[in-house]
Amino acid sequence: MSGRQGIVVGISGASGAAIGVRIVELLAGNPHYAVHLVVSPAAERTLAAEVGRDALARLRALAFRHHLHSDIGTAIASGSFPVAGMIVAPCSIRTLSAIAWGQLDNLLTRAADVQLKERRRLVLLVRESPLHLGHLRTMLQATEIGAIIAPPMPAFYLKPQSLDEVIDQIAARAINLLDLPELRAPAGIWSGPGSEGA
């Protein structure tokens, strides 16, 4: 990786594929980190529907390496392969459930489990509303084993003027949750009051 540390970005089939795309774009511009991309089959359909038919090809070109969803023997499936953390954006309820309860039958969920067992940051942008009790219990389980649940909520106090600004803010916030040196979202994308108030 030419001295760059890896970051895994998983994109699952929930709505909000543009957030995952923006995260990859922001990370790809950082000289200190290399993006390892995993896209589920359902996400491929969502990317085409919500972002465009060329979205997956653009993502593959931006990433340091694109890993097949079915390839559970690739490097990022092993804890011995050093990466700095992982973001799943968007994270479907199916993917959340698989991570929370150890159903590791594909690379996306296996790579996420590796982050947890190695005590690295795993940020899950869970995309669903409204939530029933089963969803909430699954989020609790994921949190208890070490994941960070970060639903893609707009920062209304930043007064975004477009959907692109909302996507930028959510993507930047997710990246900042990795809490890595030399990896902060560009100034102006994620800024504002330290608290949204009580």
Image (cartoon, rainbow, N blue to C red):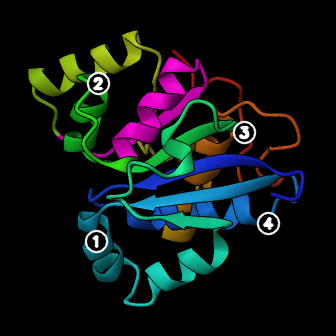
Q: Which residue is mark 1?
A: 46
Q: Is residue 111 magenta?
A: yes
Badge 4 element: loop
Q: Which residue is mark 2?
A: 100
Q: Name the residue nearer the viewer: 105 or 24.
A: 105
Real-space Cα distance between discs 3 and 1? 31 Å
- First in sequence: mark 4 vs mark 3: 4
**Is 117 positioned to the left or the right of 83 in the image?**
left
Residue 34 x %, y %: 73, 57
- First in sequence: mark 1 vs mark 2: 1
Asked whether residue 103 is in view, the answer is yes
**Residue bounds of the magenta highlight:** 108-129
Per the rendering, the mark at residue 29 is 4
Q: Name the residue nearer the viewer: 136 or 97.
A: 97
Amino acid marked by disc 3: Gly
- First in sequence: mark 1 vs mark 4: 4
- Residue that appears at 68% across and 66% down: 64
Tell me: residue 49, above or below residue 92: below
Q: In front of the other: label 2 or label 3?
A: 2
- Residue that appears at 38% across and 49% down: 72
